[in-house]
């Protein structure tokens, strides 16, 4: 029976599927049939008599777990399987484990799992000053690097991180008191239990004799340590992944897990799946050339199994509007030839670049859907700015005033705004007029002395900006940001880069609108974007638009990648990792099946103003254009990063400066500052 389903595999896939004992690394290139291989191995183990209940397969998504289960069961006689193998996400495994063993931590197994919204609500009750998303991100980082509140306090030198460590301690105390468990605890607590109880670690390891992990390049430090515990009595661990597709470093994934797998587990067998069943030879040739510029990789080369295919097209445009027109022309021709819009996609590295695409598609009447993202004018930060500008042009707009009265945070809460709304309804006056006309004393009887002062300053600022708008529309934009520091309010937010890129795109677009239409005003601009953001009803036939991160695991017959300019793709500067950027480039190229078009422009909005840009180094590295760019290597470390040193342990970067080919980092290790070269530490 086992031979039948093995016949559909190529030689490398067969070797991987039939491997039984010992550690196995399946290095699976893009489009090489990794899911087919791992599900066939699961079916093969069951078919040769391995007890299904001794097999544990871990994935990152419920969708992947369901697909694998269905495909594996389709290959075998599922009626003969008494106890099915456990095939689930890491977090589901943690939940099942805690239900049986929570008592090891002197806690009841009747715990309640809280989601991200619950977590935010709890943190807001502990602290209202620090941005909640920053707290969520930092606490998650601490847990996934096994950092206790006391250790986080010891490592904190900057006041902000000292405050976060204090909040972390209070948050943990709240969870313990109320027997609550957050998502990170579903991995952390099982590890702590297994670390504490060696006998239980052995029993659990003996129960799961064969362990498989999908997308191993996306695992973090905690997941690796948990796997080590599960392999206490054996090393029958099979991991599947692609180091060249490790693109989640920003959320804690560490590429070293897959790069060092053969060193961490004895006598590891490495099987490379290099035959690609998705893309044409031409597309693969350029993807291979690009990724070969990375040094931190195990090395493999995608081999085509299809035809040579069309040449990869490179579009050069003066600006984003010309870029959009060219892509729309191509898509119109494809659809006219009978191609389904569902087979066409446009990718970008920075979400802000969707604005010009969305507007162009709306004008052309082409249906599109944004995958894994939100339309440009529906993004919270853009809606805030639109509300500000509506208030500047129309003081009767209560809705807009209530939206921005506390953005950025000014201490104006919902209760205060509700009181003003009620007074507005009673007096039949807009809130703006009430705030303008009432004396500070009169206002303080309604909203309190402190809020009265704050709101008076807010209204005065709006009035000043109105005057500035009358004098100079360009100076108004600079003054607006200087007055409210709206963009700067996202400096320490986990998704701050994307939000600030959207704000920059919006500011740049307004500037361009006023330059091209000097006779029009801010109200005209608001009316224009209100029309542009309207889209016809979404149908099944729609072109997909998405960030490259959202495209992982997907494939399209016709693919366009835009924004191939230095600063947009790759992102450069402090904190950027050029090798991860290049891996993103590789992921983007390998989503294409039949045709691939890459696009760069000479001019785009950059940091709020139209700027002249250099074409991306990735175009020459992939062999698509001649010549190369000489660009100074950037530090992949920035102030605030957590790092690990093999002797000094965990620390936080205070400063990064160039030192020859390396970087000198000033690091705070538990209160002690040390200067260490970057090659001697690992980013967490």
Image (cartoon, rainbow, N blue to C red):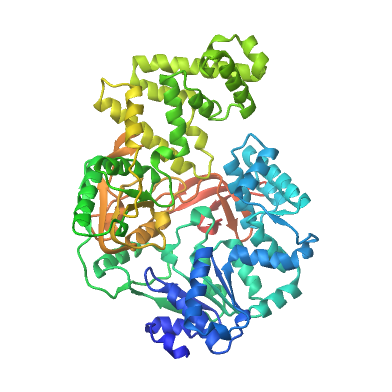
Q: Residue at x 19, y 54 (%)?
A: 333
In the depicted structure, whether residue 365 falls above or below residue 333: above
Q: Is residue 445 or residue 146 the one in the foreground?
A: 445
Q: Position of residue 452 (x, y in %)?
A: 62, 17
Side of 119 where 391 appears, left or right: left
Q: Is residue 118 visible?
A: yes
Q: Is residue 30 or residue 325 the one in the foreground?
A: 325
Q: Position of residue 512 (x, y in %)?
A: 29, 30
**Which residue is at the far right?**
106
Quarter of the rendering containing residue 30: bottom left
Q: Residue at x 51, y 17 (%)?
A: 430
Q: Is residue 667 visible?
A: no
Side of 471 where 373 appears, left or right: right
Tally of numbered discs: 0
In the depicted structure, whether residue 235 falls above or below residue 651: below
Side of 107 where 164 appears, left or right: left
């Amino acid at each position: 029976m086992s031979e039948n389903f093995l016949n559909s595999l190529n030689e490398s896939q067969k070797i991987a599927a039939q491997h039984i004992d010992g550690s196995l690394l399946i290095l699976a290139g893009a489009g090489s049939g990794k899911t087919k291989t791992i599900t066939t191995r699961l079916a093969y183990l069951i078919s040769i008599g391995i007890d299904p209940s001794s097999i544990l397969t871990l994935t990152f998504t419920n969708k992947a777990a369901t697909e694998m289960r269905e495909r594996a069961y389709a290959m075998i006689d599922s009626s003969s399987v008494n106890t099915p193998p456990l095939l689930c996400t890491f977090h589901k495994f943690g939940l099942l484990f805690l239900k049986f063993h929570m008592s090891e931590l002197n806690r009841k197994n009747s715990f309640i799992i809280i989601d991200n919204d619950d977590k935010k609500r709890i943190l807001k009750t502990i602290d209202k000053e620090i941005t909640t998303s920053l707290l969520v991100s930092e606490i998650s980082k601490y847990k996934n690097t096994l950092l206790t509140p006391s250790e986080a306090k010891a490592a904190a030198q900057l006041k902000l991180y000292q405050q976060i460590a204090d909040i972390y301690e209070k948050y943990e105390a709240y969870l313990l008191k109320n027997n609550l468990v957050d998502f990170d605890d579903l991995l952390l607590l099982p590890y702590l239990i297994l670390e504490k109880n060696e006998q239980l670690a052995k029993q659990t390891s003996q129960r799961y004799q064969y362990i498989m992990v999908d997308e191993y390049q996306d695992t973090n430090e905690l997941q690796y340590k948990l796997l080590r515990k599960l392999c206490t009595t054996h090393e029958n661990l099979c991991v599947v992944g692609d180091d060249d597709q490790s693109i989640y470093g920003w959320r804690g994934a560490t590429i070293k897990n897959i790069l060092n797998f053969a060193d961490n587990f004895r006598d590891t067998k490495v099987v490379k799946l290099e035959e690609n069943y998705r893309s044409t030879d031409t597309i693969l040739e350029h993807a291979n050339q690009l990724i070969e510029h990375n040094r931190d990789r195990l090395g493999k080369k995608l081999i085509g199994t299809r035809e040579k295919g069309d040449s990869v097209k490179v579009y050069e445009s003066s600006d984003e509007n010309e870029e959009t027109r060219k892509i729309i022309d191509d898509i119109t021709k494809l659809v006219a030839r009978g191609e389904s819009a569902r087979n066409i996609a446009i990718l970008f590295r920075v979400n802000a670049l969707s604005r010009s695409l969305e507007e162009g598609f709306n004008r052309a009447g082409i249906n599109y859907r944004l995958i894994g993202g939100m339309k440009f004018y529906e993004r919270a930060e853009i809606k805030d700015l639109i509300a500000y500008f509506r208030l500047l042009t129309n003081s009767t707009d209560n809705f807009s005033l209530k939206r921005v009265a506390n953005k950025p945070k000014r201490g104006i809460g919902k209760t205060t705004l509700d009181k003003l709304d009620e007074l507005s309804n009673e007096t039949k006056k807009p809130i703006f007029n009430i705030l303008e006309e009432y004396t500070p004393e009169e206002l303080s009887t309604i909203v309190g002395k402190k809020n009265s002062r704050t709101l008076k300053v807010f209204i005065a600022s709006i009035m000043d900006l109105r005057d500035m708008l009358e004098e100079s529309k360009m100076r108004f934009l600079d003054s607006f940001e200087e007055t409210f520091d709206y963009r700067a309010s996202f400096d320490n937010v986990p998704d701050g880069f994307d939000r600030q890129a959207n704000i920059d795109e919006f500011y740049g677009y307004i500037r361009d609108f006023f330059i091209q239409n000097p006779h029009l005003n801010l109200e005209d601009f608001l009316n224009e974007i209100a029309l542009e953001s309207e889209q016809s009803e979404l149908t099944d036939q729609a072109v997909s638009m998405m960030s490259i991160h959202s495209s992982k695991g997907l494939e399209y017959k016709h693919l366009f990648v835009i924004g191939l300019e230095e600063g947009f793709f790759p992102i450069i500067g402090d904190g950027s990792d050029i090798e991860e950027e290049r891996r993103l480039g590789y992921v983007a190229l390998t989503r294409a099946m039949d045709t691939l078009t890459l696009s760069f422009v000479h001019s785009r909005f950059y940091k709020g103003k139209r700027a002249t840009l250099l074409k991306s180094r990735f175009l020459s590295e992939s062999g698509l254009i001649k010549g190369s760019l000489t660009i100074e290597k950037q530090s992949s470390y920035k102030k605030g990063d957590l790092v690990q040193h093999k002797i000094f342990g965990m620390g936080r970067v205070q400063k990064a400066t160039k030192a020859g080919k390396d970087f000198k980092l000033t690091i705070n290790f538990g209160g002690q500052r040390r200067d260490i070269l970057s090659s001697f530490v690992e980013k967490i």
